[in-house]
Image: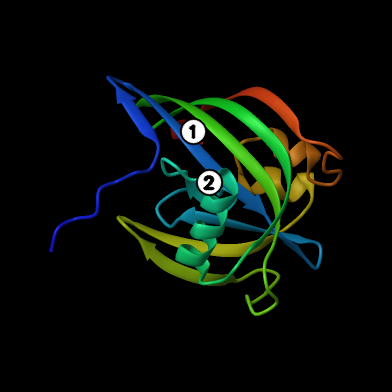
């Protein structure tokens, strides 16, 4: 069996990496869905890298099917972010698109427990619902960090930011 070519958008140049990542914010019962690689200390919003030739909305729909086994309804774009950070010994430049999305009620909900686990390549991913408050997201350590400040009042129209999350290796 031949390995499928990796069409995900990532460019590596020495100690630097550029990538395009699409993520979604799904809400239920005052909570927002988050996920992490089980070996990480920080959480993120679910999504993944865009593939060449794929729209950002197509990326998010594909990632939700691959990781959660559900069809997502993609709503509006909340933020486009040029995010800079240091992670795993490299300097990253990430172009991120963050959408409001809706997931079916068949996706389990629990206020505190992990609701889903899946092996995604080398990473064991775990998903849970976190309180959709700035205080809760700050406590969970969820980059990009500006979202904690805006989670309780989402932007009415898309916002573009240039952001620096700093050194995630130290988190």
As drawn, 62 above or below 14: below
- State which tag comes first along the sequence, 2 or 1: 2
Return the x and y of residue 69 as percentages of the image width and height: 51, 72
Return the x and y of residue 167 as percentages of the image width and height: 49, 27
**View extreme (left): residue:** 1
Return the x and y of residue 93 as percentages of the image width and height: 48, 25
Return the x and y of residue 170 as percentages of the image width and height: 47, 32
Q: Residue sitting at 63 percent across and 30 percent down?
A: 81
Along the viewing direction, whichever of 130 and 24 lies nearer the viewer? 24
User: Distance from label 2 to label 1 (Cα)?
Assistant: 8 Å
As drawn, 100 above or below 92: below
* 126 left or right, relative to 133: left
Q: Few, some or many C-alpha atoms within 10 Å of disc 2 (few <14, some 14-19, many ≥20)?
A: some
| Kind of element beneath mark 1 | helix
Q: Residue sitting at 79 percent across and 50 percent down?
A: 133
Q: Few, some or many C-alpha atoms within 10 Å of disc 1 (few <14, some 14-19, many ≥20)?
A: some
* 13 left or right, relative to 77: left
The residue identified by callout 2 is 42
Along the viewing direction, whichever of 147 and 102 lies nearer the viewer? 102
Residue 157's image quarter? Answer: top right
* 30 left or right, relative to 101: right
**Circle number at residue 153:** none
Residue 164's image quarter? Answer: top right
Residue 72's image quarter? Answer: bottom right
Q: Are marks 2 and 1 in contact (CB under 8 Å)?
A: yes
As drawn, 124 above or below 51: below
The residue identified by callout 1 is 168
**View extreme (front): residue:** 53
| Kind of element beneath mark 2 | loop
Q: In the rendered image, which quarter contains the N terminus?
A: bottom left
């Amino acid at each position: 069996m031949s390995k499928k070519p990796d069409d995900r958008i990532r460019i590596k140049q020495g100690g630097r990496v550029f990538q395009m990542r699409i993520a979604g914010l799904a809400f239920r019962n005052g909570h927002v869905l988050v996920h992490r690689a089980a070996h990480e200390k920080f959480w993120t919003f679910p999504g993944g890298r865009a593939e060449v030739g794929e729209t950002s909305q197509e990326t998010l729909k594909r990632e939700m099917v691959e990781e959660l086994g559900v069809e997502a309804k993609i709503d509006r774009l909340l933020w486009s972010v040029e995010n800079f950070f240091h992670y795993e010994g490299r300097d990253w430049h990430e172009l991120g698109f963050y959408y409001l999305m809706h997931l079916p009620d068949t996706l389990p909900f629990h206020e505190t427990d992990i609701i889903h686990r899946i092996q995604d390549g080398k990473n064991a991913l775990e998903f849970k619902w976190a309180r959709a408050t700035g205080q809760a997201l700050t406590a969970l350590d969820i980059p990009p960090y500006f979202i904690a400040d805006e989670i309780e009042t989402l932007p009415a129209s898309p916002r573009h930011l240039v952001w620096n999350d700093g050194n995630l290796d130290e988190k």
